[in-house]
Each structure stands twice: as C-alpha cells, then as structure tokens.
Amino acid sequence: MAETPKPEELFQNIDHSLPDEPWEEIPPDLSEGRFCYPTKKKNLEYLDLPTTTKDEWSPADEEWPIPDNWKEIIHEGFKDRLEKYRSLKIFMDVCVRCGACADKCHFFIGTGDPKNMPVLRAELLRSVYRNDFTTAGKILKKINGGRPLTKQVLKEWFSYFYQCTECRRCSVYCPYGIDTAEVTMMGRELLSLLGLNINWVLEPVANCFRTGNHLGIQPHAFKDMVDFFCDDIEEITGVRINPSFNRKGAEILFIVPSGDVFADPGTYTFMGYLLLFEHLGLDYTLSTYASEGGNFGLFTSSEVMKRLNAKMYAEARRLGVKWILGGECGHMWRVINQYMDTMNGPADFGEVPKSPITGTVFENAASTRMVHITEFTADLLRNNKLKLDPSRNDKHVVTFHDSCNPSRAMGLLDEPRYVLNSVCNHFYEMPENTIREQTFCCGSGSGLNTEEIMELRLLGGLPRANAVKHVHDKFGVNMLSCICAIDRAAFPPLMDYWVPDVGVTGIHELVGNALVMDGEIERTMDLRFEPLNEETEEDADE
C-alpha cells in the first residue's frame, strides 16, 4: 500500500488545470495506490459469474487475463442492456456535454482529474456507444465523438467506474436528469462480463450468498455478538435485554447492516436499537440467516442485486412476520426504494406496516413492507412515546451527514433531524449546499471503502470533510452523525485525517444514550463506556 502524504501536502497537490493532451490520449493511472484490487477467482466461481483466465493478476499488468473474444462479449452485453434498460439508451443520447455536473463530483473536486467529471466519466462509455451503435458514429467515427473499444478504453472503464461512488449528486444538477450513477452501474456490469470485478465488492457478495451477510458471520457467531452487546448494555444500564432469533410469529423482522454487528462505531448504534426496542416492549425478532440489509449487488449487476434483495423477503415469509423494520444502512434503502418493485416485488407477505406503539400506518411502505428505523423512531417521538434525557448527549456537539442513498434515493431528510433534535441539545447544520439533496458523499461508497486506495478515498472525501471542518471551527462540532454503515466505517479515517477532533456516530447510538429505561441504574457511562459528562479542565480546577 502506498504511503499517504500529510494533509497539507495532499491538498497542495490537487490540480484542476486542463491537461495539454486530449483526454482520449491520456492513459489511466494504474500505479500502486490508484486502483482497487481485483477479486479472487473463487468469489466469481462461487457466484457463478464470468471469471478471468488467471487466478492472480494486477490492474497494473500490461496484459489483462481476459478472453480472446472480449470485444464480442462487451458488444453483445452493451447491446443487450441498451434494449433492456430504456434509461441507459436515453442517457447515452441526450447529454449535450454542458458541464453543469463537472464541479459537483467530489472525486473531481478532490483529484482534479478531468475524467472524474461525471460528463467525461459517462463519455468513456458514451464514446463507444456512438462508435458502435449509432449511424452517425459508424460513418463519422471520431468526428461524431465515437471511438473504438480498445484495451486502453477497458482499463479506463476499470479505473474510473471504480472512482465513482454512485452517489448521484451530479444528477441533482443535470438539466436533463441524467443519472451518471446508472451509467457507472452499466459500465461495471460490462466489466463483470469479463470477470473484471474488485474484491472489496465481490467478497462481501459471495459471503452474503454463503452466510446471509457481507462479513461471512456464521449464525452462532451473529447471536454471540448480539449477546455481547446485551452484556455491555446490562453493565451500563442495569437492564438485561434478551432478543429473540429466528422466532416464527413475531410481528416484526428487524434487519441491520452487518457492519453494525461487527465494526465500531456501528456496534454502538446496534446497542441503541436494542435499548429502543426494550423500552417499547416491541414484538420483533432477528434472523441469523438474513442477517444483512446491505446489498453490494448494487455495485455489481442488476441480477446480483436482485438475488441478494430476495433473501430478506424469503426470510420474512418463512418467519411469518407482518413487516420488516430496517436499520441505519445506505444502499439497502436505495435498492428497496428504487428497484424493489421491479426486481422482487411488490412484497407478497404480511401487512402494510403499522406501528404497534402509535398506530401510524406507513403507507409509503405499502409495496415494500419495509420501514426505515428513523421513520419509525421519528413517529414515536412525534407521539411522545419515548422517555428521554437529552442532556446525556451534552458533551456532543453534533452535525448530520445526509447519507447519499437514504437522502437522494429515498428522500429521508427531515426524520433524522427530528430525531437528533429530540435527543441532543447541541445540533448544527453544515452549509446549505452540502446537505439534504445536495449532500456530499463520504468518498468511499459503492464498494470503494478499501485500504489500497486510501489516498483516493481521502481526496474523494475532502469536500465533505471541508464542510465538517466549517461547523467544527464555527460551532465547535465534535461529532458527525449519519445513517449509513459504510459512512460509519469510512468517516473515522477521513475525520482523523482532515478534521481530527471530530468523532463519528449513528443516530440510534445517541437515542440509546438519551433513553431513560425502566429499572435502570444511575447512568454514568454512555454506550462506549465513556463518561456521560466529561469534565473540562476548568471544571476540574474548581
């Protein structure tokens, strides 16, 4: 792994000046630290996906292990998707290359690389489309913006479609509504036809097929981890929680991203879920088989996405629950809200979700049978169903990051803020053009949260870090909250690098801190086993 330069050096190296050569003639930078590691062949074989001709290879190699008829495979795959997806055909035809999206991409802002402009990233695919699939392109070739598919073009696809986090910020500003994330998804699908995938995406996908979650956690290990959380909760609060697993007949199936079971700070968010449900006396169960809400198929292909999404609904039917409650995850909710109905739905089990505590019917989930945890909690708060002590979070000066998928893909904008303002006394927004629909990405979404490209991740996350730094300097913000497991994993190194005094939390960790439980002991520690109220140096002197 390449050594990461210091922040001031990395910042000074960003260059937005135009290159001297035409973009078509500049080869992609596939030096160490600038590419994601390709997936292991065993993962492709397990998923019955096309494989490369060699087990071990590197994108830095001159020759890639692809079949001799690779052009034919790509051409037929492209043709098939143009016929199958009307949106792809529209996105290939309607762009006028106005550049309105250019400075909206966090990777272009952070790297200065013109091919990270959404318009030019899409042009990598669009130029081949013009050359091979339009009459004008076949006749006029380069004059019409077409170019033949070559191995260098293939390498460009691999380099730049894996420098796109599919966050869709560019689509907010496009006057034609072009969704460059959809173009990226199609580009990755075409690469997948040759076995050209990255390991940080395909290994979680393979694990999900084998064990039900991205991390490969076995059922007994999943249960053990939850039991450990219950032990910690009992030590902190004096309240013993005993959640059920795989229980048939429960009213609600609760599904989380596996990162909340395995990795800090997501684990504290999971503890907050458990406290909330105990506080309510909720009739719910966890599944050790559908133990993952996230869907890395979104970063692989439509077919893989469909197969992964199906497991949650198969388990809900098996257990006979009425509806599904989903945890703080990003891409789980994009799949559910944008693709569920045409892939696996409408759901054919249970009932339209109805809160057993407030009686609220979530009509927006009538088709999917699935409610986001912040919708559920916001409704509880609106109906005064929670006993809270927000002062328990007073050491935190909080801001909120609108995770790209729940915000832009789901419209979940006000509910998280309503919850935060109910459980925290010190909450401040980042600048208006960096939040809500215009939110900046964490820089590590769509499967890019991998260590070998840390410098690229830090550059891609710079715009978000800059907005956090603004509220840190102006208001003393020391905690960044979010509702996405990838964000909770990606932000700690990003904050440590650019804004080192800011921590990262999920919203329901703060809910768990604030909840006043029946029969609890005097609370002196938060869910991280840290003092609820940290003394300042002035307090200690007094």
Image: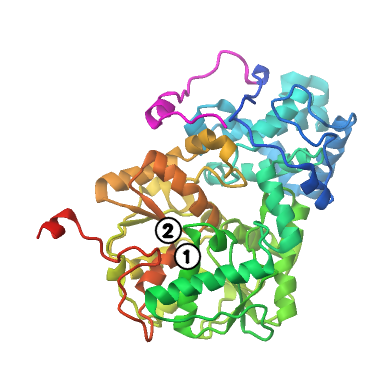
Can residue 326 be seen here? The reply is no
Judging depth in this view, the residue of 186 and 253 nearest the camera is 253
Q: Residue visible at 57% across and 82% down? A: 354
Q: Residue visible at 55% across and 71% down? A: 226
Helix, strand or loop for the magenta stretch, by majority: loop
User: Which residue occupies the extreme top position in the image?
Assistant: 20
- Picture disc at residue 505: 2
**Where is residue 436 drawn, in percent x and y?**
45, 54
Distance from Cα at disc 1 to Cα at disc 2: 7 Å
Q: Quadrant of the N terminus?
A: top right
Q: Is residue 461 above or below residue 67?
A: below
**Where is residue 201 drawn, in percent x and y?**
67, 47
Q: Is residue 20 left or right of residue 491?
A: right
Q: Residue visible at 61% across and 27% down? A: 32
Disc 1 + disc 2, Cβ < 8 Å: yes
Q: Amino acid at mark 2?
A: Thr
Q: Residues within 10 Å of mark 1 (few under 14, many from 20)?
A: many
- Picture disc at residue 414: none
Please state the total of marks drawn on the protein image. 2
Q: Which residue is mark 1?
A: 269
Q: Is residue 440 above or below residue 112?
A: below
**Secondary structure of the residue carrying numbered label 1:** helix
Judging depth in this view, the residue of 28 and 342 nearest the camera is 28
Q: Amino acid at mark 1?
A: Thr
Q: Is residue 4 magenta-colored?
A: yes
Judging depth in this view, the residue of 24 and 297 nearest the camera is 297
Q: Is residue 377 left or right of residue 350?
A: left
**Where is residue 26 drawn, in percent x and y?**
64, 18
Q: Is residue 135 above or below residue 324?
A: above
Q: Is residue 431 left or right of residue 490?
A: left
Q: Which residues are magenta?
A: 1-23
N-term-proximal mark, 1 vs 2:
1
